[in-house]
Image: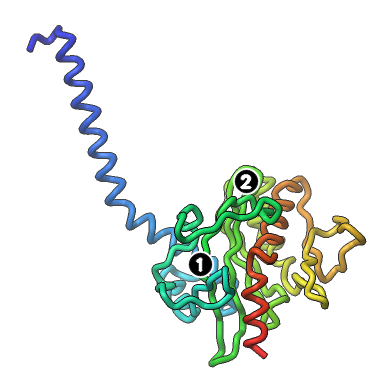
Amino acid sequence: MNNDSPYKAVFVMTLTALVCSVLVTFTAVKLQPIQKSCQNLERNRAIVKISGLTKDSKQLSDREIVSIFQKVEAKIIDMNTGDFDTKYNPATFETWSLDNNPQLSVIIPTDEDKAKLSRRSQLITVYLVKDSDSLNRLILPIYGQGMWSKIFGFIALEPDLNTIADVVFYKQAETSGIGDKILNPDWQSSWRTRKIFDDKGRLQIGVKGAQSAQKSLSSVHEIDAITGATVTVDAVMNLLHYWFGPHGYQPFLDGFRKQQK
């Protein structure tokens, strides 16, 4: 073929594009297990951090994180019934990947969708930290839409299933230096000992200084505000109100609380 032929140029460009496409696809397939492993380790490190099983997860190696995580009991709950589900293996079950699965997810009613998720999985993996048969902490995934990104975290509850033992937000893409302050350990530690529900079982958790429909919140239900990050903090409160509302964990917690007595 003549070097000056336009057909040769098109052929070379097409061949180059094809080769590049094959290489990119091959690399993506090869890297997928590694990416998955890194994502699981990131999640496990977040769970270990608030498990109460270690004082400083940052100082632990990946191997140590895996070892401690194995002491945490993973269980799947059916959000429709509030009961534990035994049909799936919690070690391999991917909760968040099912949000848009028509068979295993549900549409969230608009008036309930404070987390702006549209849909959520019917099955959620939760984590129990036990001492023999006694529950020390219950760790629940919480996630929802922030200002710019979806925010992922976990919240650990004391055995009364109301008092916050700890919280961690570990995956987000909020405004650098402002919204991403939700990752600040000092702010996260301000959640400790706060209560989600009042004595009558009403959802009361909120931001310090904010007004409820009737009166200011009691300090036992107040989380510190973050200067300049009002939108992101409000989004965090909204997702929390969704997950602990009637379309979230509330039915499960009501039933599990009775089992613990």
Disc 2 on helix, strand or loop?
Answer: loop
For the point 86% across and 58% down, the residue is 212
Chosen colour scheme: rainbow
Which residue, given by chain and number where applicable, does mark 1 sit on?
Answer: 123
Which residue, given by chain and number where applicable, does mark 2 sit on?
Answer: 174
Q: Is residue 27 left or right of residue 49?
A: left
Q: What residue type is labelled 1?
A: Leu
Establish if 23 lies above or below 31: above
Q: How crowded is mark 1: few (under 14 residues within 10 Å), some or many (20 or more)?
A: many
Q: What residue type is labelled 2?
A: Glu
Q: Is residue 211 left or right of residue 207?
A: right
Q: Quadrant of residue 219?
A: bottom right
Q: How many labels does the image show?
A: 2
Residue 55: tell me if it is visible: no
For the point 50% across and 79% down, the residue is 72
Residue 198: tell me if it is visible: yes
Residues at marks 2 and 1, CA–CA distance in whole angstroms? 27 Å
Q: Quadrant of residue 52?
A: bottom right
Q: In which quarter of the image is residue 112?
A: bottom right
Question: Outermost residue toward the right?
Answer: 215
Along the viewing direction, whichever of 21 and 259 lies nearer the viewer: 259
Give whichever of discs 2 and 1 has the lower sequence position: 1
Establish if 136 lies above or below 65: below
Along the viewing direction, whichever of 178 and 261 lies nearer the viewer: 261
Disc 1 on helix, strand or loop?
Answer: strand
